[in-house]
Amino acid sequence: MDDRMGHLDGSVSARYAHVTSGMRRRLLAGLTDQWETALDARRLMCPRSPVRVLDRLLAT
């Protein structure tokens, strides 16, 4: 878009762009998916952890 508008460095669109609630929801969903995938992978390696908070997360 910057190229089409003749802006060289992206500063104009960065200044006027805004985050919508839909963007926030998609970001949250993507980060949640990554987190759950990481926990599943960790659980497969070993279902327990000496770190109390991680051990609780692995158990749920």
Image (spheres, rainbow, N blue to C red):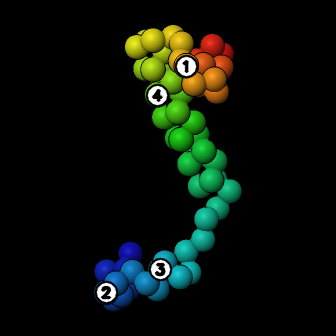
Taking 4 as reference, is 57 left or right? right
Q: Quadrant of the C terminus?
A: top right
Other residues around mark 3 within 10 Å, as few (<14) / some (14–19) / many (≥20): few
Residue 29 spot, x, y in % from top left: 58, 40
Q: Are marks 1 and 3 in contact (CB under 8 Å)?
A: no
For badge 4, the amino acid type reads Ala
Circle nearer the viewer, 2 or 4: 4
Reading the chain from its start, which is encountered first: label 1 or label 4?
A: 4
Q: Disc 1 versus disc 3: distance between alpha carbons?
A: 47 Å
Reading the chain from its start, which is encountered first: label 2 or label 4?
A: 2
Residue behind mark 2: 8
Residue drawn at (62%, 53%) of the image:
24
Residue behind mark 1: 50
Q: Disc 2 versus disc 4: distance between alpha carbons?
A: 39 Å
Residue 3 seen in the figure: yes
Residue drawn at (60%, 19%) of the image:
55
Residue drawn at (55%, 19%) of the image:
50
Q: Within the image, what quadrant is residue 4 found in?
A: bottom left
Q: Quadrant of the N terminus?
A: bottom left
Reading the chain from its start, which is encountered first: label 2 or label 1?
A: 2
Residue behind mark 4: 38
Taking 14 as reference, is 56 left or right? right
Q: Looking at the image, how many numbered discs can be counted on the residues?
A: 4
Residue behind mark 3: 13
For badge 3, the amino acid type reads Ser
Secondary-structure class at tag 3: helix
Reading the chain from its start, which is encountered first: label 1 or label 3?
A: 3
Residue 51 spot, x, y in % from top left: 57, 25
Reading the chain from its start, which is encountered first: label 3 or label 2?
A: 2
Q: Within the image, what quadrant is residue 2 found in?
A: bottom left
